[in-house]
């Protein structure tokens, strides 16, 4: 799958950069001159399916440009585990003026041996971590709701949410 992006603007003037596909050596990231000129920019990573080492290098160079030329407040939304892992591991993966707003939290069901992701706002994770199973729906689990009480976190919270402590 190839990589693509799309810019849009919300009613309040927030720029949204929606990213999709594989962030790899062939990914063409947007030019900084294409960025909307508002106070806020949202990076929506919900459609990013893969990121490899070449994509990480491209991304870090892109972030360097952002830090030099973009003065807007930047937030990251809909970050899957593949992205959260990179945020936690790679210094400079996030722009300096950015914040991770929402992530897909990995869960595991012992009953049907399935892995799921549930979208969660980062600011509420401390109070909501014990209630993540309540967000699982039929689209996640073929045995829902029979196996509802058997969901486990498929990560170590202190490691997965390390970025939130920085």
Image (cartoon, rainbow, N blue to C red):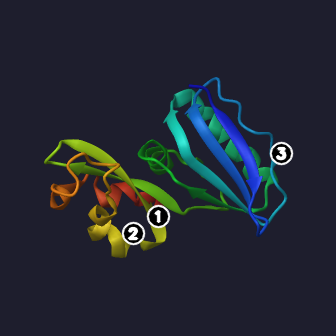
- Mark 1 nearby-residue class (10 Å; few <14, some 14–19, many ≥20): some
Q: Secondary structure at mark 2?
A: helix
Circle nearer the N terminus (1, 3): 3
Q: How many dots with numbers? A: 3
Residue 15 % position (x, y): 75, 58
Circle nearer the N terminus (3, 2): 3
Residue 165 % position (x, y): 45, 66
- Is 56 rendered above or below residue 141? above
- Is 5 rendered above or below residue 3? below
Q: Is residue 136 visible?
A: yes
Rounded to the nearest angstrom, the CA distance separating label 1 from label 3 is: 29 Å
Q: Quadrant of the N terminus?
A: top right
- Mark 3 nearby-residue class (10 Å; few <14, some 14–19, many ≥20): few
Rounded to the nearest angstrom, the CA distance separating label 2 from label 1 is: 10 Å
- Name which residue lies at 83% across and 45% down: 34
Residue 156 % position (x, y): 28, 55
Identity of the residue furthest to the bottom in this view: 127
Q: Is residue 95 visible?
A: no
- Is 88 rendered above or below residue 30? below
User: Residue 105 lies in what quarter of the image?
Assistant: bottom left
Q: Mark 3 highlights which residue? A: 34
Query: From the viewer's perspective, is 36 left or right of 27?
Result: right
Q: Mark 1 highlights which residue? A: 164
Circle nearer the N terminus (2, 1): 2
Query: From the viewer's perspective, is 70 left or right of 55?
Result: right
User: Would you say the residues marked 2 and 1 are in contact, meaning their CB atoms lie under 8 Å apart?
Assistant: yes
Residue 88 % position (x, y): 45, 50
Q: Mark 2 highlights which residue? A: 125
Rounded to the nearest angstrom, the CA distance separating label 3 from label 2 is: 33 Å
- Name which residue lies at 50% across and 36% down: 49
- Name which residue lies at 72% across and 43% down: 6
- Mark 2 nearby-residue class (10 Å; few <14, some 14–19, many ≥20): some
């Amino acid at each position: 799958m190839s990589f693509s992006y799309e810019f849009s603007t919300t009613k309040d003037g927030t720029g949204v950069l929606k990213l999709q596909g594989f962030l790899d050596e062939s990914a063409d990231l947007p030019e900084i001159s294409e960025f909307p000129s508002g106070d806020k920019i949202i990076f929506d990573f919900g459609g990013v399916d893969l990121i490899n080492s070449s994509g990480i290098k491209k991304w870090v160079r892109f972030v360097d440009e952002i830090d030099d030329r973009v003065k807007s407040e930047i937030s990251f939304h809909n970050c899957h585990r593949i992205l959260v892992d990179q945020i936690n591991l790679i210094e400079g993966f996030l722009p300096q003026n950015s914040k991770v707003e929402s992530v897909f939290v990995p869960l595991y069901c012992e009953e049907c041996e399935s892995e799921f992701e549930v979208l969660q706002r980062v600011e509420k994770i401390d109070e909501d971590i014990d209630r993540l199973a309540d967000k699982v729906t039929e689209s996640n689990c073929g045995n829902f709701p029979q196996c509802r009480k058997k969901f486990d976190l498929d990560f170590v919270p202190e490691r997965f949410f390390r970025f939130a402590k920085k």
